[in-house]
Image: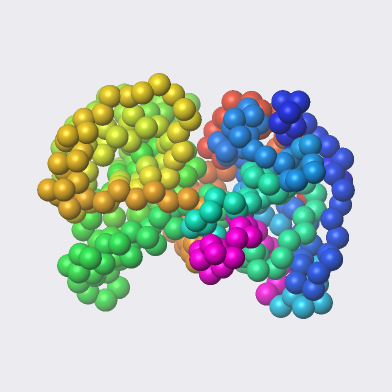
Amino acid sequence: MKAVAVFPVQRRIGLVDHPEPSVSSPTEVKLRMLEVGVCGTDREIAAFEYGSPPPGSEYLVIGHESLGEVVEVGASATRVRPGDLVVPMVRRPCPDPSCAPCRAARQDFCSTGEFTERGIRGAHGFMTEFVVDDERYMNVVPPGLRRVGVLTEPLTIAEKAVLEVWKVQQRLPWLRPARPGQPPGHGQRAVVLGAGPVGLLGAMVLVNAGFETTVYSRASGPRDNSGLVRSFGARYVAAEGVTTTQLAEQIGNVDLVYEATGASRVAFEMLESLGTNGIFLFTGVPGRKGPIEVDTDLIMRNLVLKNQLVLGTVNADRDAYRGAIRHLATFASRWPQALGRLITSRTPLDEAPALVAGQPTGIKSVVVLE
């Protein structure tokens, strides 16, 4: 069967004839892959910045944002059935028996670093015609979300981050809703750094949670997503004309910053303007560049005197996947046009190598396999 793969040693990406997998254990399921999203991680792997094939393979099948249809189930599988739409999880537990997070099915907090990630590290990904995996990693998507289900995995980034915010900020009991039905973020101000897919999905989560949400982005011209941002109730500010300090002055106390750029300079500039009792969420992973100048005295003073928190978050657990699927349904009801506009292109599998190796265009590119 066809698959898109990178050959790290040869520094090559292309279509390969990959062996079709078969169900070999009672809890495995076979998926016919429908769509696979392309993100910055895939492009970095295609540029050979990282990405490792499974042991014994010279290539790595890429793709971790996916939507598939169940076509076969093992004899003991009970969570899914043929015909179900599913999104598989990405990370798999490490084998170390002393790793408490992995043994508790929270491999997103793996303490050894020996986990595998499908399409990224040590395990083939989903940009291929068929995939076999254990049913415990499957998350069922309602049929009504067929056109946007591939956005589930990138949305889990925001879901896990916000779940952790609610847990951490329980230390501030006055933030609890004042009356029944009031959203948990009511009265709080959030800034989202970046207007790419992760930033826009994160902004939707925050607006839906009741935050006064501002998206701050350097994108302009054809990549200006200001109209899209406004269509789901957030504010858009272009970074070209407004500094992070000026942005904070306009907003008032910034209660939450959701970083979704991977750009360390703008992130640390915004960190200097985080408000009292605020929390700063890092989700991006910057590449190695030259050093930047940071006012460490100001940042440290603010962290102490303003009771601030800085939180990094990566990957996602089952609760985040479930939350992402629920929120996709909510967004499809509240903002159907805005949600649909996040997917800006659909490309056949044969053209995927050029798509992944090329420069990004639009918001979210998706490879179609059916």
Q: Is residue 345 visible?
A: no
Please tell me whether residue 239 belongs to the stretch shown in magenta: no
Q: Which residue reaches farthest front? A: 98
- Of 209 and 64, the residue lying toward us: 64
Q: Quadrant of residue 91?
A: bottom right
Q: Residue 264, position in %: x, y?
A: 37, 32
Instruction: Magenta stretch: give its range.
Output: 79-106
Which residue, as the protein is rendered here, is positioned at the far top? 290
Q: Is residue 262 above or below residue 305?
A: above
Task: Between residue 345 and residue 269, name the one nearer to us.
Answer: 269
**In the rendered image, the vertical position of residue 67 relative to residue 200, given as above or below:** below
Residue 60 is drawn in which quadrant? top right
Q: Is residue 253 left or right of residue 28?
A: left
Residue 335 picture location, percent across and down: 45, 54
Q: Nearer the viewer, residue 194 or 54?
A: 54
Seen at 55% across and 36% down, the residue is: 40
* Left-right relation of 351 to 186: right
45 or 159: nearer the viewer: 45
Q: What predominant SS class does the magenta segment belong to?
A: loop
Residue 116 horizontal side relative to residue 304, left or right? right
Residue 23, x across and y down, in percent: 83, 64
User: What color scheme is it?
Assistant: rainbow
Name, please, the residue furthest toward the left: 305
Q: How far across and how far down the image is residue 121, in percent? A: 64, 45
User: At 20% from the left edge and 38% from the top edge, which residue is drawn?
Assistant: 299
